[in-house]
Amino acid sequence: MDKFIIKGGKKLSGNVEISGAKNASLALMPASLLASGTSTLLNTPELNDVYTMIKLLKHLGVEVSFENHVLKLNTENIISQDAPYEHVKKMRASVYVLGPLLSRYGTAKVSLPGGCAWGPRPINLHIEGLKKMGADIDLQEGYIIAKSKRLNGAIINFDVSSVGATGNILMAATLAKGTTIINNAAMEPEITNLAEFLVKMGAKINGINTSTLEIEGVADLTSSEIETIPDRIEAGTLLIAGAITHGEIKLTNFPGKYLTSVLSKLEDSGCKIINSNNITHVDGVNNITKPSDVTTAIYPGFPTDMQAQWTAYMALADGSSTVTDTIYLDRFKHVPELVRLGADITVKENSAVVRGVKKLRGAKVMSTDLRASASLVLAGLAAEGVTEVLRVYHLDRGYQRIEEKLMMLGADIERIEGTEF
Ligand code: EPU
């Protein structure tokens, strides 16, 4: 297990390029299973979650080549429709293979993902949606056993807007008989990226980018090519790295339209934001950080995946703020670790009350999940002295060599490899 050693207090400044979006790749990759042939996914990030999905796809029989961010997936020789526990337990997004396998092969056996570091993350909507389309689904020994003749189109009304359930049903519906309507569909940009890929494969989808998707099933799809959109959460994390160190950072390939809620909160906190021509720029030099409350919400609201990083930022604000998570009510594992760095934060129900302090001081802290570790790195960059962030494998799941990007921006951060911490 690797750790980071961060000597805090450096102002970060400079230009940085954002990698492809993890949560887009994790949907685009299983979508390739819907056709026979080679799909090409451009701008795929080199992340552990992408490698985990590659392992699962290889287990199903997909031939994979991955060089210079170009991921080629050849699905001509699929040999299994079984996603075993070893793969799914590492990454919940593995459940994305359920819809495509069932829809194309009429059968799928996918391990139930179980809990998550910060609490329950159910998949009932995925299962209910597929059942509505005519699938016969049983839960046996920790597995979802799904069978169906050709799925039928259906009207699916999600009670909760779910990225994963929208992706799974959308993929399944492309090959169903008749029309499927998904009401209260997720509108996250990663779902739009997926829908655009499916259209390139020959799917008939109306309402892309809205909360009502209408899919007219077709008999078959052909493999295709798509560019993965840039990662809005990596972008937001790096913008906060600029803001929390009172530096100035320019994202050279990131259209601010994917992150409007975070940009407007950064402005409320006193940073200058310039956002034009696919360039997003934060200037926090000389800023006295004003406290600014956030409440997470579905897109285009403030993302739950930026909640931990915002909490770290607010820990050094000039006053108190409240950070509320309405998507994942228990997602506050970073708080006790931020407190070890000197933050003054208390959690009550699904809100953190963050009373800004003048300084954070370096300490050893433990990553518990992906975004929690990002928040610890941000706090470490701004803290006085040395912060050791342990178990950065969590961070490596979703950020492509973030320490190299931070170093280029002037951070004093070092990865210590492979020791048991
Ligand atoms: N929900 C249900 N039933 C379901 C599915 C979801 O009640 O069947 C609820 C969840 O409990 C949650 C809400 O719906 O309260 C939204 O969950 P969603 O299904 O949208 O989450 P997800 O698809 O499992 C994706 C991202 C997460 C991100 C969430 C919310 C991927 C691979 N993961 O998860 O990303 O937090 O959407 O935006 O796309 C991360 O990158 O760190 C991460 C956790």
Image: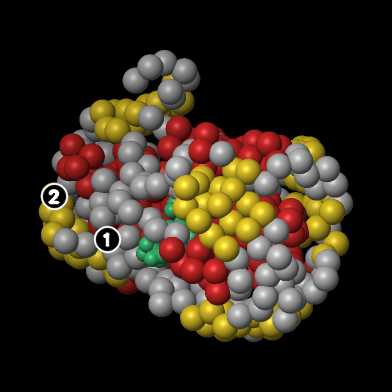
Q: Amino acid type of disc 1?
A: Leu
Judge the density around disc 2: few (<14), some (14-19), many (≥20) Cα neighbours within 10 Å.
some
Residue 371, numbered circle: none
- Ligand 1 visible in quadrant: bottom left
Residue at point 46%, 76% (across, down): 158
| CB at disc 1 and ligand 1 closer than 8 Å | yes
**Which numbered marker is on residue 329?**
1
Look at the picture and state if 258 lies above or below 381: below
Nearest-to-viewer mark from 2 and 1: 1
Is 411 on the left or on the right of 380, as rendered?
right
Q: Name the side, left or right, on which 386 lies relative to 128.
A: left
* Residue 270 in view here: no
Whether residue 4 is visible, yes or no, is yes
At horizontal 73% and vertical 56% (from top left) the residue drawn is 105
In the rendered image, which quarter is residue 412 located in? top left
Residue 187 found in image quarter: bottom right
Q: Does 130 appear above or below 380?
A: below
Which residue is disc 2 drawn over? 344
